[in-house]
Amino acid sequence: AKGAGRNRFSYFTPALQVAALNRMRLTNDLRGAVKGQQLELYFQPIVHLKTGRIHKAEALLRWRHPVRGLVSPLEFIPLAEASGLIIEIGGWVFRESAHWLQRWRSAVHPEFQLSVNQSPLEFQREGGYDSWLALLGELGLPGQSVVIEITEGLLLDASSSVTDQLLQLRDGGIQVALDDFGTGYSSLSYLKKFDIDYLKIDRSFTRNLAPDSSDMALSDAIIVMAHKLGLRVIAEGVETPEQRALLAAAGCDYGQGYLFARPLPAAEFDALLRAQSVA
Ligand code: C2E
Ligand code: CA
Ligand code: CA
Ligand code: CA
């Protein structure tokens, strides 16, 4: 038994070392990714459930690694956070988003809104959101054209600097969406404390929606509560017509998911948005 234990140990350690080395290499590559123009922004439509029209989209980051091909944000965002690169990357995401947003609002859909994900670490950015609001001003874009997607964790241990920055965003007119809602915490008191515009029902609820299921009951309750608090609701991960119908019947405002479209390269999203505007 002793021998087997030692054996297992000797297999285990190199595997961990390989994983750590892999992370180090990938982090190193990530350093060059912004300057090397390896980052791309994809856009996934957010659809008004009653009319089926696209009024918003979420910007989703992609990394085209020269050797590995597409690396998932689930893999590289944590590396960007651990290394501090998330600040520079988040800045790129916002500038790129603002560029496309201006184009779509001026040429296709005057009320179009774009959602951008924010890692909690981005709330430690020096100078806060000054430069973001300044860029919107330069481009002639109102704050309301942008939605910042944050997660519950940020609000739960919100320091005074996080609170200040949320206020700064709100003063600039920027809207706030609570992402992955229902996966995190049981305390809902922050819904009262912070000014939030949208709740995004997590995909784990949408996946198991069926009449009379517990996930249906939870989704119903979330939608009723959100509306009472003056928030609008976006369901994530809508993949089937049945899920869409159940959500619409429950009064959910917007849906996002493969049923409508996968995240698309900018040119493809542009074509989709233009096609609907003439339809
Ligand atoms: P998220 O914010 O919850 O984004 C939604 C994820 O669900 C996206 O994964 C999207 O492609 C996927 N998705 C959309 N519809 C469906 C569907 O119908 N079925 C299924 N199974 N999945 C669907 P993605 O693009 O891989 O992004 C993963 C996560 O990476 C995001 O989760 C977000 O937390 C993070 N992320 C992506 N872009 C950024 C960014 O620019 N900044 C930051 N800080 N995080 C980002
Ligand atoms: Ca999101
Ligand atoms: Ca989400
Ligand atoms: Ca998520």
Image (tube, helix red, strand yellow):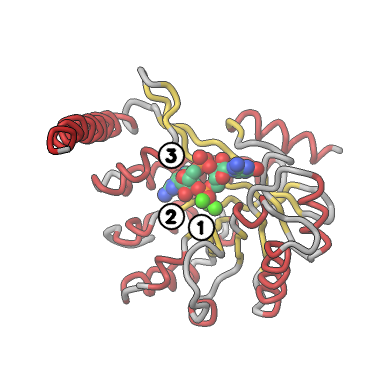
- Residue 116 coordinates in the image, percent (x, y): 51, 51
Q: Quadrant of residue 27?
A: top left
On screen, 144 above or below 77? below
Residue 60 showing in the rendered view: no
Left or right relative to 276: residue 230: left
Q: Which residue is mark 2?
A: 118
Q: Residues within 10 Å of mark 2 (few under 14, many from 20)?
A: some
- Residue 203 coordinates in the image, percent (x, y): 61, 52
Q: CB atoms at circles 2 and 1 under 8 Å apart?
A: yes
Please tell me whether mark 3 sits on a helix, a strand or a loop: helix
Q: Quadrant of residue 28?
A: top left
User: The disc labelled 1 sits on which kind of residue?
Assistant: Glu
For image coordinates 27% across by 28% down, the residue present is 29
Please tell me whether mark 2 sits on a helix, a strand or a loop: loop
- Residue 59 coordinates in the image, percent (x, y): 54, 44
> Residue pushed farthest front?
1
User: The disc labelled 2 sits on which kind of residue?
Assistant: Gln
Asked whether 110 or 165 is in front, the reply is: 165
For image coordinates 28% across by 44% down, the residue present is 85
On screen, 30 above or below 127? above
| Residue 149 numbered mark, or none | 1
